[in-house]
Image (spheres, rainbow, N blue to C red):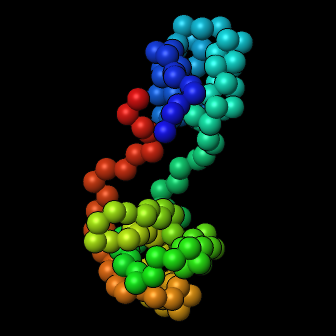
């Protein structure tokens, strides 16, 4: 894959700052990276246009909003056809409990990260998933006991 945009040291500094706190004011970001607000804004805008910055969000504590159970669900399928992949992707997109879905190489085809309030909710989710997605060869769930590290910041 080719990249059309190569961030320089100042762009990287801006990205590190806004990854840590997207609510920083433009003036604070500009001051921290040694720019005035207008050129700083232009850099941020260019990175948005280039797709380097894809959005700005607020991160929530799952436990404080009643979603304290995290489950990693490994899926092996017996069907790799385009229609199955489309059905699977469509089903996953409609399930808000799934906060991440990765297609993998190796013995597992997909890995889901699921957040739910409790085991009852996970059981309900599991039954819905397995009823809606055909040709699942193996579904293995692993329950997180402790979050040791969690970050959305990329090491740039």
Position of 74 with respect to 11 (left or right) is left
> Could one spot residue 70 in this view of the protein?
no
Q: Which residue occupies the foreground of this view, 86 or 56? A: 86
Q: Position of residue 33 (x, y in %)?
A: 52, 13
> Could one spot residue 105 in this view of the protein?
yes
Place residue 91 in its image quadrant.
bottom right
- Give above or below for 10 relative to 125: above
At 43% across and 64% down in the image, what residue appears?
103
Outermost front residue: 81
- Give above or below for 95 relative to 58: below
- Give above or below for 117 relative to 7: below
Q: Position of residue 56 (x, y in %)?
A: 62, 41
At 32% across and 80% down in the image, what residue appears?
140
Position of 106 with respect to 128 (left or right) is left
Q: Which residue occupies the foreground of this view, 127 or 5? A: 5
Q: Position of residue 13 (x, y in %)?
A: 48, 20
Q: Position of residue 121 (x, y in %)?
A: 49, 83
Q: Which residue occupies the foreground of this view, 132 or 146? A: 132
At 60% across and 14% down in the image, what residue appears?
30
- Give above or below for 19 relative to 39: below
Q: Which residue occupies the foreground of this view, 29 or 125? A: 125
């Amino acid at each position: 894959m080719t990249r059309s945009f190569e961030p320089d040291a100042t762009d990287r500094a801006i990205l590190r700052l806004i990854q840590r706190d997207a609510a920083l004011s433009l003036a604070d970001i500009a001051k921290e990276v040694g720019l005035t607000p207008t050129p700083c804004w232009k850099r941020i805008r260019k990175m948005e246009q280039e797709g380097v910055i894809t959005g700005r969000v607020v991160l929530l504590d799952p436990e404080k909003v009643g979603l304290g159970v995290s489950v990693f669900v490994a899926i092996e399928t017996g069907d790799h056809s385009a229609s199955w992949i489309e059905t699977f992707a469509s089903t996953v997109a409609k399930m808000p409990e799934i906060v991440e879905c990765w297609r993998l190489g190796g013995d597992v085809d997909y890995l889901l990260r699921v957040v739910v309030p409790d085991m009852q909710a996970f059981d309900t989710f599991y039954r819905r998933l397995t009823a809606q997605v055909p040709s699942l060869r193996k579904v293995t769930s692993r329950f997180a006991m402790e979050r040791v590290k969690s970050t959305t910041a990329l090491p740039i």
